[in-house]
């Protein structure tokens, strides 16, 4: 596959690494929470360095403690119909992230 430039090729690799790290952080959220936090930190660093967006749908990452919030594992999810948002609440620190719809 031909790429327009090296930069496009690097962005493609960064996107792949972010998706792999995302799946790893979800799978290790139960057994090894510290490792999951490290994976999310790596994801954010790769995303900011190569100016690549996080995966579609928004990855719920706790702003306070950096945990990847997995619903039913380490986060509670509820719908607020009056405010029209989905609230992810982190079970580790209690931070609540709102994703508007
Ligand atoms: Zn948290």
Image: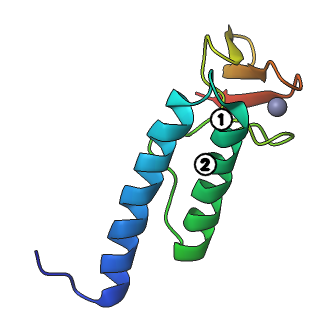
Task: Give me the residue at 78% from left, 23% from top.
Answer: 90
Residue 89 lies, with reference to residue 36, above or below; the image says above
Which of these two is toward me, 97 or 47? 47
Residue 20 spot, x, y in % from top left = 41, 48
Report the side of 13 relative to 50 (left or right): left
Which secondary structure lies at badge 1?
loop
Q: Is residue 8 above or below residue 41?
A: below
Q: Which residue is mark 1?
A: 68
Which residue shows up at 49% across the image and 48% down it?
21
Q: Looking at the picture, how far across and down is residue 96, in whole percent?
A: 82, 26
Residue 1: where, in percent of width, then height? 10, 74
User: Where is residue 3, by image quadrant?
Assistant: bottom left
Distance, label 2 to label 1, CA atoms, is 9 Å
Horizontally, is 70 left or right of 23 in the view?
A: right
Quarter of the image where the C terminus is located: top right
Whether ligand 1 has any atom under 8 Å from the Cβ at mark 2 is answered as no
Q: Mark 2 Cα within 10 Å, few/some/many (few <14, many 20+)?
A: many
**Front tag of 2 and 1:** 2
Q: Is residue 36 left or right of residue 91?
A: left
Name the residue carrying label 2. 39
25 lies above or below 49: above
Percent of width and height locating residue 8: 33, 79
Question: What residue is at 56 percent from the left and 38 percent from the top?
Answer: 25
Q: Is mark 1 within 8 Å of ligand 1?
A: no
């Amino acid at each position: 596959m031909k790429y327009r430039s090296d930069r496009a090729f690097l962005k493609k690799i960064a996107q792949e690494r972010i998706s792999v790290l995302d799946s790893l952080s979800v799978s290790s959220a139960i057994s090894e929470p510290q490792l999951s936090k490290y994976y999310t930190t790596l994801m954010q660093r790769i995303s900011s360095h190569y100016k690549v967006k996080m995966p579609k749908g928004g990855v719920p990452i706790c702003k306070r403690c950096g945990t990847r919030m997995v619903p039913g594992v380490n986060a509670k999810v509820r719908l607020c119909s009056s405010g029209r948002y989905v609230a992810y609440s982190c079970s580790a620190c209690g931070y609540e992230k709102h994703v508007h719809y």
